[in-house]
Amino acid sequence: MKPRLKEKYENEISQALFKELKCSSIMQVPKITKITLNMGVGSAIQNPKELEGAANDLSKLAGQKSVITKAKKSIASFKLREGVAIGCMVTLRGDRMYEFLDRLLSVAIPRIRDFRGLSRKSFDSKGNYTFGVKEQTIFPEVDFESIVSVKGMNITIVSTARTDSDALVLLEKFGFPFRK
């Protein structure tokens, strides 16, 4: 069975974008290619249990195993050595990506405290959108009892849009709550 947002994209959103962006071919219509979730756990240098907890939480959110990321450089002021595990990440594609996006838009974002909308300035110049979440507890999959400490994460949505304005229109069609 197809995810709800994937069906909505194929049936409604792509047709609307084709007309609105005045594309000459249906292949020029922008689409979301992947979503990357990244959790930096700087305190994992002193307490490796926090990294395990963050990796488990990220795996529950994504529905697939997270990858432990290691430091690329040594930084003396942070007591960080090259090769030390300091974070975790997951890359979602296909059906899992659409299912996560659906949970993000319909369940997680409405649970954010004092939410006033997502910033329109978080696009890079290539049509990708990145925003941060301050705590992983907004997702219902995460157990409050199993949390070692509250961690934030970065969520990056990569699209085939050539400009930021095209990407903004794409994400608005999906229902992203941007600030007015």
Image (cartoon, rainbow, N blue to C red):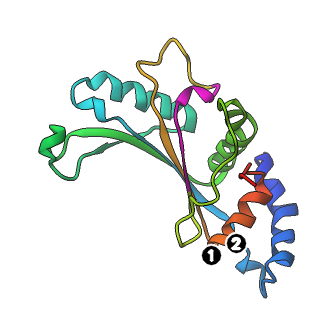
Q: Is residue 53 visible?
A: yes
- Answer whether residue 138 is magenta in the image: yes
In the visual, does 97 lie left or right of 130?
Answer: right
Q: Label 2 belongs to which residue?
A: 166
Callout 1 touching callout 2 (CB < 8 Å): yes
Q: Nearer the viewer, residue 3 or 171?
A: 171
Q: Amino acid at mark 1?
A: Thr
Q: Residues within 10 Å of mark 1 (few under 14, many from 20)?
A: some
Q: Amino acid at mark 2?
A: Asp
Q: Is residue 55 above or below residue 69?
A: above
In the image, farthest residue toward the top: 145
Residue 64 percent location from the top left of the image: 52, 39
Q: Is residue 122 left or right of residue 103?
A: left
Q: Is residue 67 magenta?
A: no
Please tell me in which quadrant of the rendered image residue 29 appears.
Answer: bottom right
Q: Residue furthest left?
A: 76
Residue 79: give x, y in percent of width and height: 15, 37
The percent position of residue 2, horizontal first and vertical second, equals: 77, 49
User: Which element is circle 1 on?
Assistant: loop
Q: In the picture provided, is 45 more to the left or to the right than 127?
A: left
Q: Over which residues does the magenta segment extend? A: 130-140
Residue shown at the point (81%, 62%) measured from the top left: 10
Question: Would you name the residue on which mark 1 appears?
Answer: 163
Quarter of the image for residue 48 reads top left
Q: Is residue 80 visible?
A: no
| Picture residue at 26% right of the left edge, 38% below the top | 85
Query: As drawn, which residue projects farthest toward the bottom?
Result: 24
